[in-house]
């Protein structure tokens, strides 16, 4: 069951969505980009199911169905398993081999990568996928530990087997058997498994002390128990090989491949690029910086958002052009008093004084010089002010609408540009890997070795 709902057009877009929702960190997303989820599904299921963040199960299975958990589940598992170079890893319910293949890049060539699968047809399908992946450009360009699969019931693991650094169980563990699976852990080893209604991490601190933590709410199907009345594969015992020191032949093979990679990477580097991962890292640092100023501080505005310009509200000029009252040059005492104090009076009182003066003149009072220019100036001022305020309001509304449309258009343009840029980078990486792979094989073929050894160097991994 997936933790977040997202759909990608390809594997890189799927991984970008996982990074976006914090399902996996940028450092580990590197491996998810190397292993295309679609390569572990039948061709007829790839287009509709490969790049959705949801679990997938085949329609037919004889006897077992093909099944892959949601990418966000595997991302969460990889985060908390914390796989390291040279460690031993046991995948219980290994299925199609998708998770084991990703784990191989963390373990590198000197690690141990075991999987246990109940159904033989599913294990055969996983082995076929691994055989194809072994000769892929990704497996040549980076150190990778090839998984080995064993068929049988996980409840029938031999107790005298190895202790593992990391274990993952891909089905719900019953309460009565949690200690059973924990017994296969080394000290300081980590087990991640569905337990109850949660994905749980267990760290073995000592022989009898375990530290547990619930990671997230999940829903998984149950592990199939042993049926004593059935002689089918569900009762099959699993005998895992004891850990042995790496043979000299494998050590030499790994060293030769490593030296060839080092030589090729100087002239033919392979770039694993994620546009969203870079943006996400910057965003995270920006939020962290903002939090340093206090919990109540606002998040910084995105670059696309910009403040609206202030709406102009101009006031009428204090004296119209050509006003005979300018500088208080008026024979009317009351008007002189009004104009001399106009700077200290509110605008509404000033207009009232002028209207009173005009009314008195129209009634026949001798109030001084002609006021025709005053009346014209006042009317023009009022009309101009009304028009300016009306235009300002309309301008503000248009600015707001334009800002929304502008932001939406810019976001669409930015998304198209980012998609195109990502497609270009994915294409470049594919070409780089293909070029690297071709040169890798060419150099191996040029070595003074017999045919059998050359095939060993090219098509198999530790």
Image (cartoon, rainbow, N blue to C red):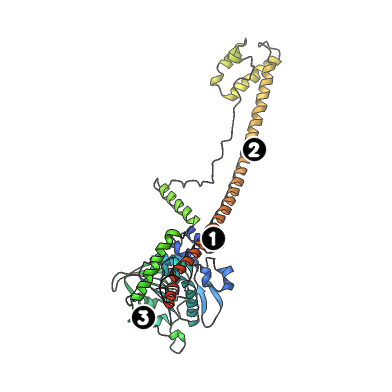
Mark 1 residue crowding within 10 angstroms, few (<14) / some (14–19) / many (20+):
few
Mark 3 residue crowding within 10 angstroms, few (<14) / some (14–19) / many (20+):
few
Residue 72 x/y as whole percent: 48, 65
Q: SS of the residue at dot 3?
A: loop
Residue 175 x/y as whole percent: 39, 76
Quadrant the C terminus occupies: bottom left
Q: Nearer the viewer, mark 2 or mark 3?
A: 3
Residue 394's mark? 2
Residue 427's mark? 1
Q: CA distance from mark 1 to mark 2?
A: 49 Å
Q: CA distance from mark 2 to mark 3?
A: 80 Å
Q: Nearer the viewer, residue 105 or 120?
A: 105
Q: Is residue 281 visible?
A: yes
The quadrant where residue 45 appears: bottom right
Query: Circle 3 is placed at which residue position?
Result: 241
207 above or below 372? below
Q: Pointers 1 and 3 in contact (CB under 8 A)?
A: no
Mark 2 residue crowding within 10 angstroms, few (<14) / some (14–19) / many (20+):
few
Q: Would residue 437 appear left or right of 339 to someone viewing this image?
A: left
Lower position in the chain sequence, tag 2 or tag 3: 3
The quadrant where residue 147 appears: bottom left
User: In the image, what residue occupies the spot 59% across and 51% down?
Assistant: 412
């Amino acid at each position: 069951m997936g933790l977040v709902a997202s759909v990608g057009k390809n594997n890189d877009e799927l991984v970008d969505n996982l990074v976006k929702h914090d399902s996996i960190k940028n450092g580990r997303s590197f491996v998810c980009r190397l292993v295309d989820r679609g390569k572990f599904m039948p061709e007829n299921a790839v287009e509709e199911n490969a790049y959705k963040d949801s679990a997938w199960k085949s329609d037919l299975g004889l006897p077992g169905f093909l099944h892959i958990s949601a990418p966000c589940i595997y991302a969460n598992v990889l985060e908390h398993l914390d796989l390291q170079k040279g460690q031993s890893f046991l995948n219980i319910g290994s299925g199609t081999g998708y998770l084991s293949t990703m784990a191989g890049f963390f373990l590198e060539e000197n690690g141990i990568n075991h999987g246990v699968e109940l159904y033989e047809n599913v294990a055969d399908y996983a082995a076929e996928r691994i055989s194809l992946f072994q000769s892929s450009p990704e497996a040549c360009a980076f150190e990778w530990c090839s998984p080995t699969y064993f068929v049988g019931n996980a409840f029938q693991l031999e107790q005298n087997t190895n202790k593992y650094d990391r274990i993952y169980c891909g089905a719900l563990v019953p309460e009565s058997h949690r200690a059973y699976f924990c017994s296969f852990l080394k000290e300081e080893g980590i087990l991640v498994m569905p337990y109850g209604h949660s994905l749980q991490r267990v760290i073995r601190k000592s022989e009898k002390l375990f530290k547990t933590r619930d990671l997230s709410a999940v829903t998984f199907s149950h592990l199939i128990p042993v049926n004593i009345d059935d002689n089918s594969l569900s009762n099959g015992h699993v005998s895992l090989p004891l850990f042995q020191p790496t043979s000299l032949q494998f050590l030499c093979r790994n060293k030769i491949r490593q030296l060839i990679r080092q030589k090729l990477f100087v002239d033919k580097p392979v770039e694993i690029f994620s546009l969203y991962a870079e943006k996400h890292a910057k965003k995270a640092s920006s939020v962290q910086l903002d939090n340093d100023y206090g919990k109540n501080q606002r998040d910084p505005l995105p670059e696309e958002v910009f403040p609206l310009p202030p709406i102009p509200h101009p006031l009428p000029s204090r004296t119209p052009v050509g006003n005979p009252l300018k500088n208080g040059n008026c024979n009317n005492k009351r008007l002189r008093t009004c104009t001399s104090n106009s700077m200290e009076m509110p605008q509404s009182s000033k207009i009232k004084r002028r209207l009173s003066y005009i009314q008195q003149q129209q009634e026949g009072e001798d109030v001084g010089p002609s006021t025709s220019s005053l009346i014209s100036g006042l009317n023009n001022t009022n009309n101009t002010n009304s028009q300016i305020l009306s235009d300002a309001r309309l301008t503000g509304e248009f600015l707001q609408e334009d800002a929304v449309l502008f932001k939406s258009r810019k976001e669409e343009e930015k998304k198209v540009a980012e998609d195109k840029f990502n497609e270009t980078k994915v294409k470049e990486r594919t070409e780089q890997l293909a070029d690297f792979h071709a040169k890798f094989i060419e150099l191996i073929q040029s070595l003074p070795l017999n045919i059998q050894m050359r095939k060993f160097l090219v098509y198999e991994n530790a």
